[in-house]
Amino acid sequence: MQFTAQRRQVVEYGRQMARAALAVGTWGNISCRLPGNLMAITPSGMEYEALEPKDIVIMDLEGNCLEGECKPSTEQPLHRAIYAARDDVGAIVHTHSVYASAMAAARKPIPAAVEDLVQIVGGDVRVAAYALPGSSQLGSNAVAALAGRNGALLANHGVVGVGTELGQALLICQIIEKSAQIYIAAQAIGGVVELPQEDIDIMRDFFLHKYGQR
Ligand SMILES: [Zn+2]
């Protein structure tokens, strides 16, 4: 079996996504980029707790399955489109978390109003134009909404978070969910006040270049 370490990671983060209640049942999907324009992606319709590394499907970015006993996630065109368009993306997590999905169902972007969101996502969270789940149109719509961002909402559907590695992509989905909760709660007390672009740029730069033990 090739890419065992990466397959293990995809399994591990799939479980974390399910345990964090970002997806219910077998929905949501996770992938990471592999050397040689390949990706490792979760299989279609399998419980996260039951997944094993051998269930993770290895695909190329043209859509050919190279290794794995299962069918890949039906959202594999979304993952392929993002890897093809974004060299900076090493991992993708797609979730159906409740508050972010409420925003997506209302087709309302999450404004840039809290620090962690603008640091890790890069600004507001746009809503990708509606397209059927599993379609390649959904992939190109998501790529457009992700321009200059590390996360987007998918209209009437859910969230996509993209990062350099799986831990970051999952964290992005969690921060987007938290920001959606904050936005909806703030609407009850007069609405959020958006951050000025100048400050967003400072916070984003800090996160990209100076955050943590650097
Ligand atoms: Zn979905």
Image (cartoon, rainbow, N blue to C red):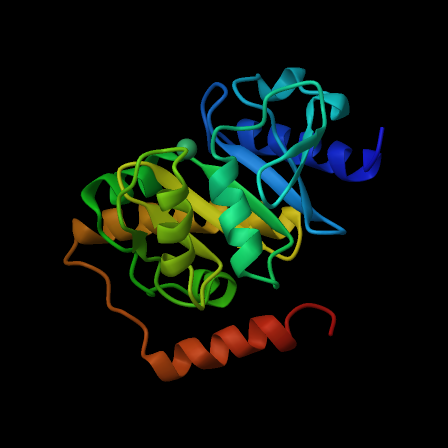
Residue at 53 percent of width and 28 percent of height: 73
Whole-percent x, y for residue 191 in the image: 18, 58
In what quadrant of the picture does the N terminus appear? Answer: top right
Lateral position of residue 201 relative to residue 53, left or right = left
Q: Quadrant of residue 158?
A: top left
Residue at 14 percent of width and 58 percent of height: 190
In what quadrant of the picture does the C terminus appear? Answer: bottom right
Lateral position of residue 4 relative to residue 72, left or right = right
The image quadrant in which ligand 1 is located: top left
Lateral position of residue 149 relative to residue 66, left or right = left
Whole-percent x, y for residue 78 in the image: 47, 43
Front-lying residue, 69 or 6: 69
- Residue 96 seen anywhere in this rendered image of the structure: no
Front-lying residue, 175 or 26: 26
- Residue 182 seen anywhere in this rendered image of the structure: yes
Lateral position of residue 1 relative to residue 35, left or right = right
